[in-house]
Amino acid sequence: MPRGGSLTKLAYYSTVQHKVAKVRSFDHSVKETEDDPLYEISVQEEITARLHFIKFENAYIETCLDFVKDHLVNTDTKVIKATGGGAYKFKDLIEKKLKLKVDKEDEMSCLIKGCNFVLKNIPHEAFVYVRHADSEFRFQNTHPDIFPYLLINIGSGVSIVKVESEDQFERIGGSSIGGGTFWGLGALLTKTKRFDELLQLASRGQHASVDMLVKDIYGGAYGTLGLTGDLIASSFGKSATADKEFSKEDMAKSLLHMISNDIGQLACLYAKLHNLTRVYFGGFFIRGHPVTMHTITYSINFFTKGEVQALFLRHEGYLGAIGAFLKGAEEDNPNQYSWGENYAGSSGLMSVSPELNPMQRARSGTFDMLEMDRLERQLVNLPLLQDPSSYIPDTMDLTEDAVAREYWLFCFEEALEGVVKRAIASQPDLPQTRERAEKFSQKYRHKLQTLRHQPFAYGSLTVRSLLDTREHCLNEFNFPDPYSKIKQRENDMALKYFQKAVKSLESLSWEQRQFALVKGLLAGNVFDWGAKAISDVLETNAGFGFEEAKRKLQERPWLVDSYNQWLERLKGPPHKCALFFVDNSGIDIILGVFPFVRELLCRGTEVVLASNSGPALNDVTYSELQILTERIAAMDTVIQTGIKEERLILVQSGSSSPCLDLSRLDKTLATVVRERHTDLVIIEGMGRAIHTNYYATLRCESLKLAVIKNSWLAERLGGVLFSVVFKYEEPPKYQEETHQ
Amino acid sequence: MELNGYHCEDEAAAETEEEESVGEKQQWAQRKESAAPRAGDTTEKEADAPRASASRERLPSNSMPRQRTDSLKKNRPPFPWFGMDIGGTLVKLVYFEPKDITVEEEQEEVESLKSIRRYLTSNVAYGSTGLRDVHLELKDLTLCGRKGNLHFIRFPTHDMPAFLQMGRDKHFSSLHTMLCATGGGAYKFDRDFYTMADLRLRKLDELDCLIKGVLYIESVRFNGHSECYYFENPTDPDLCQQKPYKLENPYPLLLVNIGSGVSILAVYSKDNYKRVTGTSLGGGSFLGLCCLLTGCSTFEEALEMASCGDSTRVDKLVRDIYGGDYDKFGLPGWAVASSFGNMMCKEKRESISKEDLARATLVTITNNIGSITRMCALNENIQRVVFVGNFLRINTLSMKLLAYAMDYWSKGQLKALFLKHEGYFGAVGALLELLNQS
């Protein structure tokens, strides 16, 4: 619980009880009838860990403590961790109210701990601020190594900290001219009490009426030094007179420039002295205020001539609280887990610009929250990424592409009704299904609206983040797996065709078979409830079949067509091991993927099937795939032998998203990939191979295939609905050379 | 100088120079047969550069032979000799008053020249805002072979029109003199000088002039006293006192000029320097903020208030936040954590005086200059810092603060030095250029 000048941030850890969908295989000793479903679906309660961070004004401290008190029931907590200068101020109040001992943690070490945590665990945590750009926020990739960096914390004063590793940091300097100076001096000059109001004043002011500019002294630029005429020569230099009135706005603006420039200059001097280029800014002065982010960015640019970029953090306001919490939870070692931002429970980055959204601003002043789900595993990079530091999962950044953003926001909003219907249908026997579905609908619609105004709220806006947000919202209202029944039905149906499909493939010549296998994969991939064009077809025409899907496919040459190269490659030696990221349940996995896997196994290639850890749309989950594989093995000796000899193994991806982030994968998967010397990665489906990873470069051969089931996207890529992408790639040449 | 072999090289160099001079001298002698050998010696040095002449000025040269003055007329600009530095807030003017004027010369002297001299030397205040800093006057100075006093005059830049009007009224342009000016105003008012007073300015770079001026005044000393000084025991308020400092082997040094804004220069030799950085938080900010916060209108008023105020009521100190020292980071409790930080709170805003605010403004601006300077010194690896500029005029508070800050935060590694002629070096440099270029 760090307490800065005016806001209190509270971090707590909770176990969240929520519904999860479980699948369980029936006892096979019992004779099955035709109508028996393949497996049983049940919704169970599961407990997961979640970190909550709440921020509110100090005025609400008592309310906050009541809240904490209510949530302390049944815990044996004895101590509450507090940090920040104000920890003294409220110590007695906290101890009296909560009957807990206040354990004061060092502010700076909490801040650094929190900063390390968010930089490591939250993709798109850091951003560069560009005023007037279509999206003002340019999010940065998470660099695999976050150290060393400089953290400039602008609270009431300024602290400059050099962070070299998880536990090693040093306060290398600071300044007394900080947020407190802006606020204090600003209040004196303008008689405006609130910090936010001062910033508003500043954003409307003209500093040139108060500041003495170079041109006021020189009449123009100071050419020999390259100082332009508009540069401030002397802050407040024009107000040195008793007989002139200055507007509040102009004075506030001048003050803002004075302080921002000064901090920027010191930051640059320290960065230069310590030879650091990654400089993060935080503290209440910065905290999501476009005005100060802009002036600091400008100043850093000016003083380093563009060599250093000012970086800001989405969750900067919580760093101290996160750090204090992590210190308290050290015995649990939260660092051994990975954490994921819960989009449903987090309020997201706010545009504090008052003109933009007064309602949001009012909210940000008093209440704001962040939730992080503990992902019961550590997430790591796919070891086969060519360059983990430059890997960007998403193909399109909707924060920057306004046209695409409009389309997808519209698309998701339109699809919402269908999702709600499906959610209701998935839980006919559970209580308050309709009410919960309605709440889900409201929440997601609200998120979409927020994103329309503030596309940057959760980092770069992407199709992936829109899909993930929907999943998080569904989970929030206990719809863990709206597609469970559909998946079950489709799996059931597809299994019945498996042997027939294999048989027909075996009758083909080698070359015909290779093509049929690829076509099967593609046709299977048409069956996707996530794509609106298909869900409409599936909705109205239940009999839409595999063969029909094949007919719908684009004829060769495909939109992206490297099939010939792939075929040539198959004529060569078998791959050592293929990692296959699978997509949908039903026809896709059973009639598309398994025959293909079967062929790979026959060629002598080991196969690692990677499926989602948790449900997302109709994607096949790890637990479903286990049952399916078991069933297929029972009717197919190749698969059976593969399983038995561990030449076919199933792993979970660590994700619950219809998309795929190759920089956040289950650690086990990475280990398997490394141990088996994987030399082929197959990524299937729109979500994983088009919306994400389309441009991902790997250090081994890769196959990305999908059917474009969205006419807008197809058009954008230069094709039509049901265009086929078949992208076979060899690793970049220079890589091979260095290996030889 | 005598202590080590290093100096021997210097001497050797000096000797070589001497030899070359002899050759030159002969040439001069041929051209001006009447020149006395000794005077001739001085002559070509002057023609060489004012910097070089500077070292000679201290030589006693009491009786000037008449012929010499005449013969030198062509190599010397006509009187009056001015150097001007037109800054953002103040115009600094140095005026050389020749004291060795012969009867003949006086007869020849045009009335306007006399009137200017009389006006400037017989007054200490000009108009409502012009002032002569009598205490800074350099007496018995020899410049360009002429002996006289150097006067230091200043007036606010906003009174420039009045000054030009005076120049016009006194028929300054009829003297056909070259007016050397530096500072931004030399550019800004260039046209006004021409249109209002029929004067053409020779515009000079302000940093060149600043450095030339500093080196010159340092070398001629201040009427026999040291120009440069420092504060002994800067960290002990009781024992802290001003002491003369001998600025020998001055390079490299960091020169911090605190005018309306601040420029920080790293000086490696007399003509090798670079502007490291600057800040807009300078003297102009102090006065500007003080005027807004307290309603005062002059630097003197602002300083007077600051001297009676208590900044710790306005600033938030480390101990206000942490209850004492912040040991982990070596921050003492008395250090300012947030300038004006206490003013975030309404009650405290109502409990402080104007004097407290003036003091806090002074401390804020001064400390900030101190910390930027310190970072530059570290980045440039320079241990000596010379602070100049009119912000330091009658401002012992700031000088002591700077001396303290340099010493304390560098653990004694950095030394803060000050010069008595604070803000006049640019103008002096401009005057030297006048003498150099003719």
Image: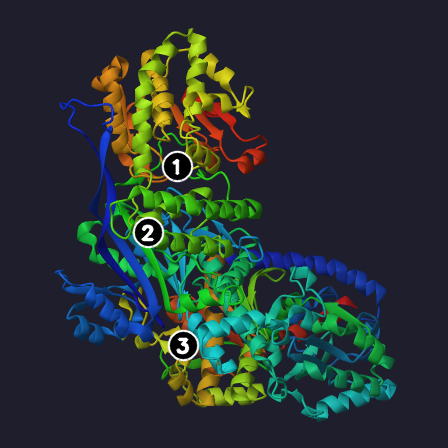
Residue B42 in the image: x percent, y percent?
A: 72, 70
- Other residues around mark 3 within 10 Å, as few (<14) / some (14–19) / many (≥20): many
Can you say whether B176 is above or below B304 in the image?
above
**Helix, strand or loop at disc 3?**
helix
Can you say whether A5 is above or below A587 in the image?
below
- Other residues around mark 1 within 10 Å, as few (<14) / some (14–19) / many (≥20): many
Observer-nearest of A522 and B420: A522
Which callout, 3 or 1, points to the residue nearer the camera? Answer: 1
* Residue labelled with disc 1: A660
Separation (CA) of disc 3 from disc 1: 48 Å
* Residue labelled with disc 3: B341
Q: Give the chain of mark 1.
A: A
Residue A442 appears in which quarter of the rendering? bottom left
Q: Give the chain of mark 3.
A: B
Observer-nearest of A495 and A475: A495
Q: Is residue A355 visible?
A: yes
Quadrant containing the N terminus of chain A is bottom left
Observer-nearest of B49 and A542: A542
Q: Give the chain of mark 2.
A: A
Q: Are marks 3 and 1 in contact (CB under 8 Å)?
A: no
* Residue labelled with disc 2: A434
Tell me the amino acid under the disc marked 2. Answer: Arg
Tell me the amino acid under the disc marked 3. Answer: Gly
Residue B336 appears in which quarter of the rendering? bottom left
Separation (CA) of disc 3 from disc 2: 53 Å
